[in-house]
Image: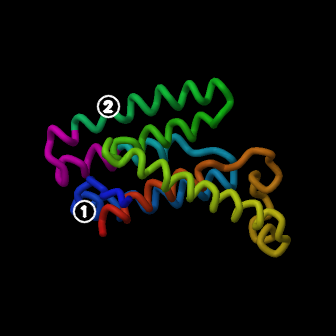
């Protein structure tokens, strides 16, 4: 069974150039400091706020904001239970308006695959002195926790890339 993405390709193409640097920032920051900056979360929300009305019908653009609220509430509940960090919850919420509801299941499969790959890659890099030596001060090398931004950011980016093609 193949899942067709419902985000219009024009919208995805318009979002990608703006979302890409934020996703790199989030992944890098989470690996280096085990924190996703609030400025990155706000930048992502501003991208949707500013670019969205130009590439999506206004009623669709407006209703997508509900996704932010729902994901933020779920994220805070998960954060209170210790399942993920507050920055992860906020980033996921800011990313939520970019994802169409019809694509949610497909995005979860995509995220699961990216999470497994990111976890394995991070642990291999962490155990490789030559790689670890290139960024000796990164907190994720010594933390028992995983920098979830390393999986969340690429999941949004790959979702948009798949929608664009």
Expressed as whole percent of the image width and height from the top left, the position of residue 83 reads: 65, 34
132 vs 107, left or right, is: right
N-terminal-most mark, 2 or 1 = 1
Q: Secondary structure at mark 1?
A: helix
Q: Which residue has dot 2 on it? A: 66
Report the residue that reaches farthest toward the front.
1
- For the residue pair 99 and 29, the one nearer the viewer reads as 99
Expressed as whole percent of the image width and height from the top left, the position of residue 61 reads: 22, 42
Dividing the picture into quarters, in which one does residue 113 lie? bottom right
Residue 9 badge: 1
Q: CA distance from mark 2 to mark 1?
A: 21 Å
Expressed as whole percent of the image width and height from the top left, the position of residue 58 reads: 15, 41
Judge whether residue 43 can be spotted in this image: no
Q: Which residues are magenta?
A: 46-61
Q: Are marks 2 and 1 in contact (CB under 8 Å)?
A: no
Q: Residues within 10 Å of mark 1 (few under 14, many from 20)?
A: some
Name above or below for residue 47 compared with residue 69. Answer: below
Judge whether residue 154 can be spotted in this image: yes
Q: Label the magenta part by its dominant secondary structure.
A: helix
Q: Is residue 49 magenta?
A: yes
Q: Residues within 10 Å of mark 2 (few under 14, many from 20)?
A: some
- For the residue pair 99 and 15, the one nearer the viewer reads as 99
17 vs 80, left or right, is: left
Q: Secondary structure at mark 2?
A: helix
Q: Is residue 157 magenta?
A: no
Dividing the picture into quarters, in which one does residue 78 lie? top right
Expressed as whole percent of the image width and height from the top left, the position of residue 95 reads: 41, 45
Residue 81 badge: none
Residue at 46%, 56% (x, y): give it: 22
Name above or below for residue 85 compared with residue 24. Answer: above
Dividing the picture into quarters, in which one does residue 62 lie? top left
73 vs 117, left or right, is: left
């Amino acid at each position: 069974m193949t899942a067709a993405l419902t985000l219009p390709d024009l919208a995805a193409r318009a979002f990608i150039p703006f979302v890409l640097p934020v996703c790199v920032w989030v992944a890098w920051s989470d690996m280096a400091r085990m924190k996703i900056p609030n400025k990155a979360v706000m930048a992502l929300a501003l991208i949707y706020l500013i670019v969205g009305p130009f590439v999506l019908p206004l009623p669709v653009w407006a209703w997508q904001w509900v996704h932010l609220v729902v994901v933020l509430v779920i994220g805070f509940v998960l954060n209170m239970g210790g399942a993920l960090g507050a920055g992860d919850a906020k980033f996921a919420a800011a990313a939520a308006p970019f994802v169409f509801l019809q694509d949610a299941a497909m995005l979860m499969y995509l995220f699961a695959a990216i999470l497994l790959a990111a976890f394995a890659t991070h642990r291999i890099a962490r155990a490789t002195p030559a790689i670890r030596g290139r960024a000796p001060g990164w907190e994720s090398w010594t933390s028992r926790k995983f920098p979830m931004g390393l999986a969340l950011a690429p999941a949004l980016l790959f979702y948009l890339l798949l929608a664009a093609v």
